[in-house]
Amino acid sequence: MKRALRVSAWLALCLIVAAGVEAGVRPSSARAAEVSQPVWPVLLHEENDSEGVLPALRQQVKKELSLTEDEAGYLDGDPFYELNLGGMPAGYTRQFLAVTYHGEHFYLLLLASDRNAADIRTLDKVTGDDRGDLVINSAKIDVGVDGSTISVWSQAPFRAFQSEAKLQWDGSKLKVLSHEYSDPTLDFFAEKAELLKKGDLAGLLKLEDQPEGTYVMYPAFYEDYFALAAPTLRLAYKNALEAYKKGDAKTAATYLHYGLQQYTEPYGLWDWETGKLTADDLKSDANDFHPEGRLKASEFIPMLNDYAFFLSETKRYKEAKPILLNVIKLSPSRAVAYLNAADTEWALGEKKAAQAHYKQYLKLLGKNASKAPKRVQQRINAK
């Protein structure tokens, strides 16, 4: 949703500082008396409140909501915006919007004052509608102005759950024009789960390809971030094997890379591409948010091996090598890993290392060593 003239609290602060507002001059003072012209909402804070209106505004809110001294103390951290929606009573030239929490509800209070903020009155206050509170968090909030309309966006702590509301000031009251709750991250995971259910890897890849500048917010605070990780990797692995059987190692590598990323990120296995995973990394521990979603090492390591193999098949040897050496470290008895590592090292011109791994490969094959590819013995014997 586009938000006209919307500015977040932190962005407003940055804009004020960057603009180099002169000390002693209120940012909106040049337009405060123009009650017919809305102004950009300015977040007030101690540094730009040169006229010292914040204490008086907090006192008005305290009075309006019948706050105790302890409750009023929290107003120091609540946002107060100066704006101008027009329609002010005679003798009043400045408007402010206060956002605070009291009695299990968030309040929006529209205040008016004279030029010196010596006389302050409450024009109206609202909490919510039949959906719930218009504001769900005063620490993550954007306020915008478009004519006599206020748009308010807020987001829950550590979640993508958000509230978007529009209110109009008609000169006597704030009227709620619209109000919606949404959770784009919850929607994202619901769509991902549906695509997984259909086995639609192409759809999953498209879903992951977010437009530039967008991202999934707070994924680690949603259970599906973990619960869908292993199923996504399994589906990607299945499709990768099918692509390779059709002779398309490049697509196989692309599919499996996606799947591995989807699984390793939730469980903090960030070193999987650099070859630094340890056996302990692959074990579930008490810190896991969703331990039942962990793959056993016996299932994960072959996927890692095959991804590196696909890389080698597409001549991406330098990327494949650390992964293959890591597979050997994680699963020393996995014969094919030595073959893959040796082939990769041979392609990189590292003959001695390759020969050592070819020999270990034959050793692990034991009585089946005669079934090894002919190149193995040829390269071992090469000078």
Image: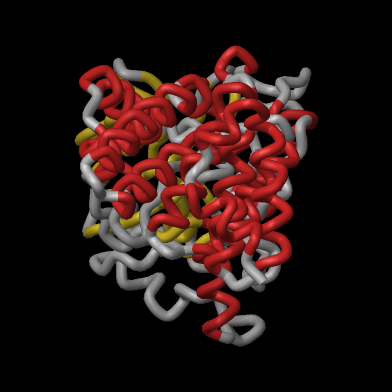
Res. 108 in view = no
Q: Nearer the viewer, residue 87 or 185?
A: 185
Res. 358 in view = yes
Q: Nearer the viewer, residue 343 or 115?
A: 343
- Residue lying at 48% horizontally and 61% vertically, measured from the top left: 114
- Residue lying at 53% horizontally and 25% vertically, measured from the top left: 226
Return the x and y of residue 115 as percentages of the image width and height: 50, 67
Return the x and y of residue 305 as percentages of the image width and height: 54, 40
**Would residue 89 be found to the left or right of residue 23 on screen?**
left
Return the x and y of residue 367 as percentages of the image width and height: 63, 26
Q: Nearer the viewer, residue 260 or 382?
A: 382
- Residue lying at 60% horizontally and 41% vertically, measured from the top left: 337
* Above or below 335: residue 215: below
- Which quadrant of the structure image shows residue 327? top right
* Above or below 25: residue 344: above
- Which quadrant of the structure image shows residue 86? bottom left
